[in-house]
Amino acid sequence: MSPPPEPARPSPRVDCAVDGAVATLSLVNPARLNAMTAAMWAAIPAHVRSAEADPAVRLLVVRGEGRRAFSAGADISEFEKSRTGDAARHYNDLNHAAFAALKGASKPTLAMIHGPCLGGGLAIAACCDLRIADDTAAFAIPAARLGIGYDPRWVRPLLEILPPPRVKDILFTARRIPAAEALAMGLVDRVVATASLEATVAEIARSIAANAPLTLRAAKAAVDALTRHPESADLARLDRLVSDCFASADYAEGCRAFLEKRQPQFEGR
Ligand code: COA
């Protein structure tokens, strides 16, 4: 009798599922610890755009499929064809577009991190506003072990989180940083047991989603602009976003709900 056929491996992809106010982007390449293929990088911007355009979505969560890994970085099995010669430029463009989409999201973004979070996977997590990890999470940028030139555009998100000496440590040593050390250095915002990770992220998501979307948008824009361009941030734009809050129905609702001792129901306008 012939052996039963092997279960089909899911093809590498990025899924996006909307559940209530939360859009979850899942990095799916489980046979390779959710390593990112070119097609996966290419899929991210459209998912971010659709989450941005959906008024019901209040925040984005990025995670690796399953519980084994966030992402073990770029899929090295593709490097020979995709990261040499002209193909390398195209590959870099896909990377940049994915990072730019995540960093440019006006809604809050949160990385939920199980297991390895390496290379490009760490760059994705660094492009999110918050990083919540479990105690199996481990971080590294192995570029120096592979001889990869680490693009300055990917260094920038790390510098928004960590002081330069910590970034140099990560890049120079290429060492594996366990969850506890990542928490101590500020690379992640919270570390919890694996069994609690999904509930913790759901609770943080619930508390963010309950708040006034226009206030969140103005706050995120201010933190990002003032971090990225401290001397030349477009204060007029940031002021307009704050004015939008005061002019909104949500502002009236927030004040009314406080006086009526009830939870506000915000609509983002
Ligand atoms: N690209 C392609 N395949 C990868 C991968 C990557 N970045 N990371 C892991 N895989 C594959 C492995 O080759 C292995 O495939 P196989 O089962 O066909 O042999 C599978 O994923 C499981 O990985 P494995 O190494 O067996 O798991 P492990 O638990 O022993 O080790 C890591 C986990 C993450 C430490 C190890 O896989 C690793 O070092 N990966 C490379 C990370 C890296 O350099 N990323 C940066 C890329 S720029």
Image (cartoon, rainbow, N blue to C red):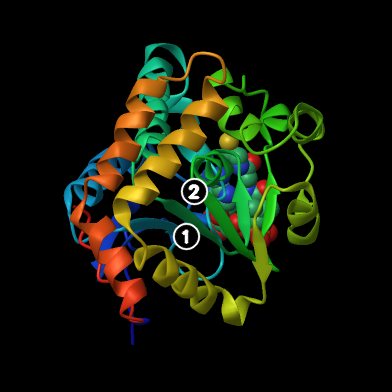
Q: Residues within 10 Å of mark 1 (few under 14, many from 20)?
A: few
Closer to us: 78 or 133 = 133
Q: Amino acid at mark 2?
A: Ala
Residue at image mark 2:
35
Would residue 80 appear left or right of 230 to someone viewing this image?
Answer: left
Q: Taking the image as drawn, is residue 9 in sight?
A: no
Where residue 66 appears, x then y in whole percent?
Answer: 47, 70
Closer to us: 248 or 36 = 248
Disc 2: residue Cβ within 8 A of ligand 1's nearest atom: yes
Where residue 255 appears, x then y in whole percent?
Answer: 32, 65
The answer to whether the residue labelled 1 contacts the one labelled 2, judged by CB atoms less than 8 Å apart, is no
Where residue 100 appears, x then y in whole percent?
Answer: 39, 30
In the rendered image, the quadrant that contains the N terminus is: bottom left
The residue that appears at 70% across and 37% down in the rendered structure is 162
Q: Residues within 10 Å of mark 2 (few under 14, many from 20)?
A: many
Q: Secondary structure at mark 1?
A: helix
Residue at image mark 1:
31
Q: Which mark is residue 121?
A: none
Q: Secondary structure at mark 2?
A: loop
Distance (Cα) linking label 1 and label 2: 9 Å
* Quadrant housing residue 250: bottom left
Q: Taking the image as drawn, is residue 12 in sight?
A: yes
